[in-house]
Image (cartoon, rainbow, N blue to C red):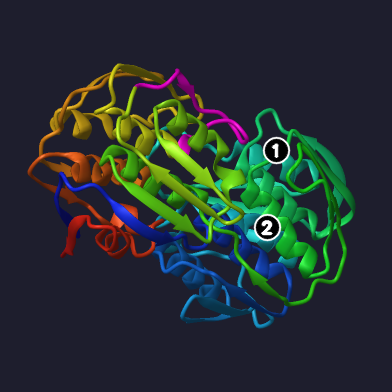
Amino acid sequence: MGAYQIRGGSPLRGVIPIHGAKNSLLPILAATLVTKGECVLHNCPRISDADVALAILRSLGCEARREGQTLIVNTYPACETEIPAVLMQKMRAAVIFLGALLARFGAARLTHPGGCRLGNRPIDLHLLGLRLMGAQCEYEGEELLCRAAKLRGATVALPFPSVGATENLILAALGCDGEVVLCNAAREPEIADLCGFLTACGARIEGAGTSVVRIRGGCALHGTEFTVMPDRMEAATYLCAAAATRGEITLTHTEPAHLRAVTDVLADGGCEITQYARQITLRCDTLRAVSPIRTAPYPAFPTDAQAPVMAAMATAQGVSVFEETIFSDRFRHVPALVRMGAKITATRRYAVVEGVETLHGACVEATDLRGGAAMVIAALAAHGSSTVLRSEHTERGYAALVQSLRDCGGQIIDTE
């Protein structure tokens, strides 16, 4: 079990280049399975979730290797339709391989996905759409078995704009006869990036990044070369760390438009933010409480940024209120922040943060990916030394976290 040792109290100052987006790379890796060719993917972060996705591809018979920030995947040799349970349990996004396997082979067998424990996260919306496309989906004990002699075109109206369901159904639609229309589709930038990759492979997709996406199935897809978009959640985390430590950082290789919901909140809190085409600079001298924050699907405030922003607001002047509408158990980081001196009252859906003058060091344990990032932010802002246990949670989604923070003056080391 890894841990971070952090001595807080030093403002972060410096430049951090943003890595490729985890939430874009993982569905794109699943999508390579449909191409039956070699794909060269650039700007791929070194994170443990990417390693799991590559292991899944290899378990299905594919060839996959890393060369620096580039991944080379040849899916032509793929011949298996079952994902080992041990790999499914390591990553929530493993479920995205379901749609790709159905499109490629007309069959898939997998167990329920693992990942961060954020409350009830069913895949019923995924199965709803797949069944409308003609797939037979049933559970056999702990395993989910899906079959489709031939998927068919359909119109699928999602009751909620689920990111995972939207991605899975787009991938499955590539193996359909006819057209699939997804209504109330998720609009996150990562979905547009997935569609951009598929289009480069020869897919015919209209409406990527909007609430209505049309996919023409049956197109022969080929391999391609593609660059993954920058990670907006990594960028949001570093912005929150700079605000919490009253520092000044510049993020490069990023996309400011994707971060508007977060930068608007930080600006509301008194941060000075300057944006350029691919760069953001944040400076914070005084931090004040912000208007009530309500998480919701893109382009609203993202649930993945809730914990990092809460950590920053722990020492803001005044009271900030958070409403979590996406996951039922996404305040699991609150007890750790309270242990560090934060004054937070949380229910299942709401959290009220009354800013305190200072936080203090403590030993805490990361509960999930973003919750662990929040604890790192709080530790950087606190007086004294902190230990954040279970650093493997943050390593699922943050590449070079320790080095990036150290480059900006953060006193942090990674221990085993």
The answer for how far apart the CA atoms under marks 1 and 2 are is: 21 Å
Residue range of the region highlighted in magenta in the rendering: 289-304
Residue 159 falls in image quadrant: top right
Residue 302 seen in this snapshot: no
What secondary structure predominates along the stretch shown in magenta? loop
- In the rendered image, the quadrant that contains the N terminus is bottom left
> Residue at point 39% right, 29% down?
270
Does residue 278 sit above or below 359 in this rendering?
below
- Report the amino acid beneath label 2: Leu
Residue 382 falls in image quadrant: top left
Residue 373 seen in this snapshot: yes
Q: As rendered, which of 276 and 225 lies closer to the eye? A: 276
Image side of residue 165 versus residue 58, left or right? right
Residue at the extreme right: 178
Q: Residues within 10 Å of mark 1 (few under 14, many from 20)?
A: some
> Residue at point 62% right, 38% down?
162
Residue 85 falls in image quadrant: bottom left
Query: What residue did someone put label 1 on?
Result: 128
